[in-house]
Amino acid sequence: MGEPEHLHMTYNDVHKTIEKSAKQIAAEFKPDLFIAIGFFPARVMRTFLKDSVTKRNIPIYAIGLSLYEELPGTTAEQIGSQVIRTQWLGPESGKTLLGRRVLIVDEVDDSRKTLHYAVSELQADVEREIAALPEEEREAKRTKFAVFVVHNKLKEKLGSLPDDVPYYAGENTEDLWLDYPWEASDIEDHDRLADEEKASGKFKNAIKSV
């Protein structure tokens, strides 16, 4: 199997996409806590969203999930068969999330397996805490989740999200390998390739309206 076709995103590309999406999320969901699978997009999102009540910065918690595995003999990667949890919120994650409006943030929705895992596991953490509360307190403490991704790949998904979890995507893209600047070891070469893709029309053709 050869190298997949790549598309290079710049910091400016990502920043502007998040800025555009933040207005809709502020109007419709009003998060008061971020959970970052992709930390850089979550940090940029916080620039544009403040807590709707306190007007202060919204706290960011990070989780680490891995789904990709290397292809032998190449520098490419493929989607793995299972999600591996590399970092979580801690033993009392459910208590941290009780009654909050949580926006889960990632850079890309590829197979949706990672997002499915994150939402399912976080909801399970919350439900364990809810079950320990007096019955009359449970409804007020239920957590609301939503998902934001900078890029959604237009492809068949292997995972799913609950119907009551709002889903926001900054942009839809063709099924290409998306290279982000925070993953680049040579940022100047990365930006040069991004400029070439824009000049050739490849970038414009790969990005689809949401």
Image (cartoon, rainbow, N blue to C red):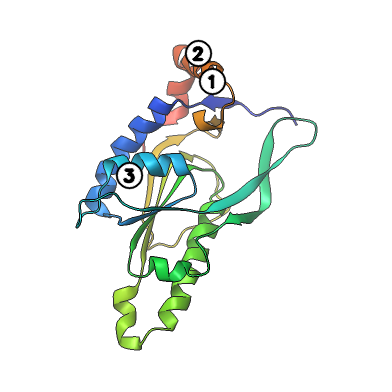
Label 3 neighbour load within 10 Å: few <14, some 14-19, many 20+: many
Disc 3 to disc 1, how far (Cα)?
25 Å
Which residue is at a point 63% across and 49% down the rendered structure image?
Answer: 67
Q: Nearer the viewer, residue 149 or 190?
A: 190
Label 2 amino acid? Glu
Asked where in the image residue 183 lies, by quadrant, the reply is: top right
Label 1 neighbour load within 10 Å: few <14, some 14-19, many 20+: some
Label 3 amino acid? Arg
Q: Measured from the top left, where is residue 202 in percent x and y? A: 49, 19
Q: Quadrant of the C terminus?
A: top left
The residue at the far right in this view is: 73
Asked where in the image residue 126 lies, by quadrant, the reply is: bottom left
Q: Measured from the top left, where is residue 92 in percent x and y? A: 48, 70
Q: State whether residue 64 appears in this view.
A: yes
Relative to 52, 69 lies left or right: right
The residue where tag 3 is placed is 46
Label 2 neighbour load within 10 Å: few <14, some 14-19, many 20+: few
188 shown above or below 121: above
Q: What is the secondary structure assignment of the residue under circle 2?
A: helix
Task: Report the label total.
Answer: 3
Q: What is the secondary structure assignment of the residue under circle 1?
A: helix
Q: Nearer the viewer, residue 181 or 79?
A: 181
Q: What is the secondary structure assignment of the residue under circle 3?
A: helix
The residue where tag 2 is placed is 196
